[in-house]
Amino acid sequence: MPDCDHLTAKKIFDDLLHRAQWLIRAKDFDGYKEVFDLPFGLVNLDAAHVFSTPDDLGLIFENIQHRIFCLNLTSYFAVCLDARRVDETTIVATHETRMITDNLLVGDPVPSVAVLKYVRGQWLLTEVWNFRPDHFGTSFLRVEQETRPAAQWFAMQARVYGALGGRSGLSSAR
């Protein structure tokens, strides 16, 4: 059982988001991959993937670094909107990612749902659903495609919505 009763689910997720963002800015892939539990599931609007190895996670890291470079971003950060502990070892949370160049928001914030698990004595990301526009090119061809039937995705979405008390915390799902 995790010994973190003094921490709220939101604080736990905020801390994990801040850690991941710092590692992205520092271009520290070795540290970044330690934020995830494998296999890690990533669901985007255009595809769903399972990242099974640390090298697979490199594709996500490279994609983010490429986006920062190509868009000349001065800031790339995620903000936790809501988080709830589902059980002793699971947190479901929502966040929005914002990309900024010279104090201007680059597109709309990207809403996401994250699932954290308490494993090996720490909270790690196990699954993220990004409501990222298709034109972001978020399909990773070298990574195993998720094969869950659509009905199972809808059931998972309903569970997340229920875990957050009927509130997604998202400003909108684009």
Image (cartoon, helix red, strand yellow):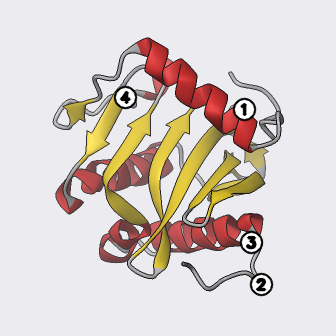
Three-letter amino acid code of the residue under disc 2? His
Q: Earlier in the sequence, mark 1 or mark 2?
A: 2
Residue tagged 4: 48
- Circle 1 or circle 2, nearest the eye: 2
Q: Earlier in the sequence, mark 3 or mark 1?
A: 3
From the viewer's perspective, tell me whether residue 157 is left or right of residue 163. Answer: left
Q: How many marks?
A: 4
Three-letter amino acid code of the residue under disc 1? Asp
Q: Earlier in the sequence, mark 4 or mark 2?
A: 2
Residue 133 in view, yes or no: no
Q: Secondary structure at mark 2?
A: loop
**In 3D space, how far apart are the residues under numbered discs 4 and 2 (Cα atoms)?**
35 Å
- Decide which of 58, 76 is in the foreground and name it: 58
Q: Is residue 47 above or below residue 56?
A: above
Disc number placed over residue 6 in the picture, else none: 2
Residue drawn at point x = 60 percent, y = 28 percent: 157
Q: Quadrant of the N terminus?
A: bottom right
- Circle 3 or circle 1, nearest the eye: 3
Q: Give percent across and percent down for residue 95.
A: 69, 48
Residue contact between numbered discs 4 and 1, judged by CB atoms under 8 Å: no
Q: Earlier in the sequence, mark 3 or mark 2?
A: 2
Residue drawn at point x = 35 percent, y = 50 percent: 40
Three-letter amino acid code of the residue under disc 3? Lys
Q: Give percent across and percent down for residue 66.
A: 38, 48
Residue contact between numbered discs 1 and 2, judged by CB atoms under 8 Å: no
Disc number placed over residue 108 in the picture, else none: 1
Residue drawn at point x = 39 percent, y = 31 percent: 138
